[in-house]
Amino acid sequence: MSEPEVNTNEEKKGTSDFVEDGKNKMVIKCKYCLSKILEKKTAVYVEQEKELPLMFQGIDRKQGEIKKEMLNEYYHVDNMYIFENIGFTHQVDNYKYLTCADCEAGPVGYYDLDSKHSYIALSRIEHS
Amino acid sequence: MAKTYDCLFKLLLIGDSGVGKTSILFRFSEDAFNISFISTIGIDFKIRTIDLDGKKVKLQIWDTAGQERFRTITTAYYRGSMGIMLVYDVTNEKSFENIKNWIRNIEENASADVEKMILGNKCDLDSKRQVSKERGEQLAIEYQIKFVETSAKDSLNVEYAFFTLARDIKAKMEKKQEASNPTRGSGAHQLRANEQQRRPTSWLSRCSLL
Ligand SMILES: Nc1nc2c(ncn2[C@@H]2O[C@H](COP(=O)(O)OP(=O)(O)OP(=O)(O)O)[C@@H](O)[C@H]2O)c(=O)[nH]1
Ligand SMILES: [Mg+2]
Ligand SMILES: [Zn+2]
C-alpha cells in the first residue's frame, strides 16, 4: 500500500492507528477482561508527562513503597459520566485513580480533583 | 459533544459492617490484583452503563462503610441518591434486625421518594444461615420494598438487583412526568425531537441534567 507522503514524518509512534481527529478512533477496553471503558471518539488524545503507580506492585516491595512509571500518552475525558464503565478509588493526595469496573485492574489512569478531569493512559488499556 | 446517555442514577449501598456491601458492588476479590496498588487504597464508587429497555442509563454506585453505623450517616451522605440497596447478611441475625433502623435512618435523612430494595446477601452459606428467606420476604412486604437474596461470592442475583432498582427509579420518574402532564397518555416519555426541545422539564432531559 502506498502511503500519502505528506503526513509520514508527522506521525508519532503508531498513535495514528488509534487517534483520529485528535480523538480515540476505537473503543477503549480493559486489557484483562475487555470490559468497555470508553466509546469511540469520546476522549481527546493528549501528550503529557505524568507518573502512574504500577498495576502490579510485586510482593517483594518494602512497606509503604509505591512503584511508579512515567507515562506520556493519555486520553483526556472532561466529564466522568462519559465513561461507559469505570471505578474511582478513594482519594490519594489530589487524585482518585481509575480502574476497570469489572476486574478492578488499575490504575488505568487518574482523576484530578481540582479540574475534575480524567486521564486514561494509552499503555494501560486495549484498543478494539 | 453529543450526550452519551439518557439518564443518570445515583445509588447507595447501606447495611451493617461485614454484610458484603463492598463485595456486592466491587468484585469478590481473591485474585492477583490483591497485591496491586488498587486493593490497598480501595474503590469509592463505580460508573456503570446499562441498557434499560432501550435507554442508555448510567449508574453511579457508591459504597458506604457499615461501621459508621446508622446514627452517623446523615443527609449529606444521602444527597442526590435516587436508589438505596439495603443489605443484610443471612448468616447474621443482628444485621437483619438492623434493616429496620437503616430504613428509619433513610426516612429521616434521604429524599422521601428514594427507591429502595432489600438484599439478603451470602445466601451461598446455607449451613450458617440464621435468617430464612421467608423472613426476608415478610419484612419486604411490611415495608413494601422489593427483596432478593444475593451471593456476591457466586455473583447470584447481584446484576438482577441493580437492574430492578434502576428500572423502578425509571418507572417512578416516568410516572411523575405523566402526573405533571395529565393530558398525555402512557407514551408521555416518547416525545419527538421538536417536542422535547419545547419541553425542557420532560423526565428525559431532567434526569440527564443531574
Ligand atoms: N460466603 C460469602 N461471603 C461473602 C459474601 N459477600 C461478602 N462476603 C464476605 O464477607 C466479608 C465482609 O464483606 P465486605 O464486602 O467487606 O462487607 P461490607 O458490608 O463492605 O463491610 P464494611 O465495609 O465494614 O461496612 C468478606 O470477608 C467477604 O469476603 C457472599 O455473598 N458470600
Ligand atoms: Mg465495605
Ligand atoms: Zn477489567
Image: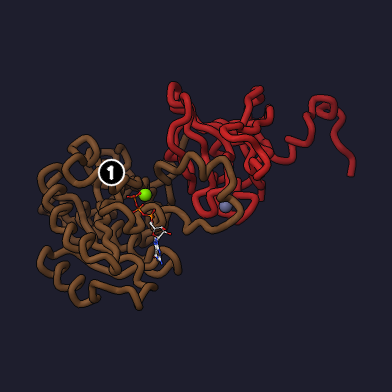
Chain colours: A red, B brown
Q: Position of residue B158 (x, y in %)?
A: 38, 64
Q: Position of residue A108 (x, y in %)?
A: 59, 40
In the picture, measured across the screen, residue B90 lies left or right of residue B97, that is: right
The quarter in which the C terminus of chain B is drawn is top left
Vertical order, B51 against B71 (above or below): below
Callout 1 crowding tier (Cα within 10 Å): few <14, some 14–19, many ≥20: some
Q: Nearer the viewer, residue A18 or B195?
A: A18
Q: Position of residue A10 (x, y in %)?
A: 80, 25
Q: Quadrant of residue B156?
A: bottom left
- Does any portion of residue B134 appear in the rendered image? yes
In the picture, measured across the screen, residue B190 lies left or right of residue A5, that is: left
Q: Quadrant of residue B54?
A: bottom left
Vertical order, B167 against A75 (above or below): below
Q: Residue at x 61, y 32 (%)?
A: A66
Q: Nearer the viewer, residue A101 or B13?
A: B13
What residue is pinned by disc 1? B207
Q: Residue at x 47, y 29 (%)?
A: A92
Q: Residue at x 29, y 55 (%)?
A: B190
Report whether the residue tagged 1 is closer than 8 Å to ligand 2.
no
Q: Position of residue A106 (x, y in %)?
A: 58, 43
Vertical order, A63 against A1 (above or below): above
Q: Secondary structure at mark 1?
A: helix
User: What number of labels is visible?
Assistant: 1
In the picture, measured across the screen, residue A38 lies left or right of residue B125, that is: right
Vertical order, A56 against B127 (above or below): above
Q: As shown in the figure, which amino acid type bears the numbered disc 1?
A: Cys
Q: Nearer the viewer, residue B60 or B97?
A: B97
- Does any portion of residue B178 appear in the rendered image? no
The chain containing the residue under callout 1 comes to: B
Q: Residue at x 55, y 51 (%)?
A: A36
